[in-house]
Amino acid sequence: MKALVLVCLLGLWGAAPAFAATSPDEMLKDPALEARARDLGRELRCLVCQNQSIDDSDAELAHDLRRIVRQQIRAGASDIQIKDYLVARYGDFVLLKPPFKATTLLLWLGPLLVLLGGGALAFAQTRGRRAPPEAAELSADERRRLDAMLTGDPGA
Amino acid sequence: MSTALPSDGGGAGKGDGRRRLVYLLPVLLFVGVAMALGVGLTRDPEQLPSALLDRPAPALDLPPIQGGDRPGLASADLKKGKGPVLVNFFASWCAPCRIEHPIVSRLAEEGWTVLGINYKDKPEDARAWLGNMGDPYARIGADQKGLAGIDWGITGVPETFILDRNGRIVWRFQGPLQPRELERDVLPLLKSLAP
């Protein structure tokens, strides 16, 4: 049963591109260029729906942006040029993956900082606790009984 | 802790203080996170800062609405040097535009220059809408394909920009202007930019 559910879920996942909003009439004729446009579209945010890519969204603006991406690809623009074109108009928000720069340092490095800070704290804590307890000397009587046990002399 | 007898002297007291600081750490962390979230979660995610703020307005060269009585809109019209101008994206099919129309009209009546960009509209619909509601715009550019909209980074209509006398964008608002924005942002800004 679990296997069946898993197979169904995998099937859904595999079928996901079929849900994309790109309609046949806006596709490029060259399959390689169209594939580039699709990949690029998945990295660009639809600014109306905000949590969908322009490849997924059926919004009017997403449609316009898909058309612009394809126009520029046909005109020979590189992926970076197309992204720059859109960032100049909509800001970094149009990129679903935020760029690595001064204002996003905390975003990218925050988890690492938390890990390092937590690690340092945990290290300091466990090291403090590992201080060995002071071993008390055996008394003369205890020493005598221990010797007796070790030599196996039952008379002691 | 039971070993911290008075006879242990200052050493134990120091360790105690440090331990107390460690106990405070989660509290401080919580306060920090709560403050960050308090600021972050009360902001309106629908209102994005424009990438064009403090930059010259994108180039425009739009024809007038077909059959309309207002001239079209080009870059030169944005910086006539007389004072700030408002650029308002609108469409007849846009319900929120109807809501903000009285505010836009009031700004025009008070003497501010309001320029319109008619976004993805049919000329006859736009003419009818302006005829019914009144036309507050000094000039109207018809952006039938929405390309000017993309150049200006709009995500829908209505959107309103305020430009200073040199044609730089100093303010952008997404959605219908309401009395709140008018009193809080628009009027003070226009007055501060006026010669």
Image (cartoon, coloured by chain):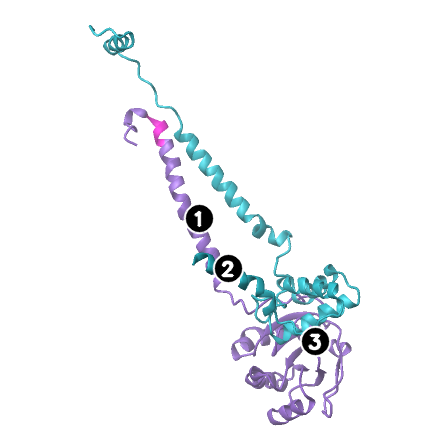
Q: Residue furthest left?
A: A155
The tint of chain A in the picture is cyan
Between the residue at mark 3 and the residue at mark 2, the CA separation in whole angstroms equals: 33 Å
Q: Say few, some or many: other residues with alpha carbon within 10 Å of mark 2 (under 14 / 14 to 19 / 20 or more).
A: few
Colour purple, chain: B
Between the residue at mark 1 and the residue at mark 3, the CA separation in whole angstroms equals: 54 Å
Q: Say few, some or many: other residues with alpha carbon within 10 Å of mark 3 (under 14 / 14 to 19 / 20 or more).
A: few
Q: Is residue B26 above or below residue A148?
A: below
Residue identifier under label 1 = B29
Residue identifier under label 3 = A25
Q: Is B95 or A138 nearer to us in this picture?
A: A138
Q: Residue at x 44, y 48 (%)?
A: B29
Q: In the image, residue B52 lies at what x, y percent? A: 67, 67
**Amino acid type, mark 3:** Asp
Instruction: Confirm whether circles 1 and 2 share one chain.
Output: no
Q: Is residue A10 magenta?
A: no
Horizontal relation, residue B81 to residue A21: left or right: right
**Parent chain of label 3:** A
Label 1 element class: helix
Instruction: Confirm whether circles 3 and 2 share one chain.
Output: yes
Question: Dots 1 and 3: beta carbons under 8 Å?
Answer: no
The answer to which image quadrant residue A73 occupies is bottom right
Q: In the image, residue B81 lies at what x, y percent? A: 74, 76
Q: Is residue B128 above or below residue A32?
A: below
Label 3 element class: helix
Q: Residue furthest right?
A: A75
Residue identifier under label 2 = A7
Q: In the image, residue B57 lies at what x, y percent? A: 72, 71
Please give the range of residues in magenta.
B9-13
**Amino acid type, mark 1:** Leu
Label 2 element class: helix
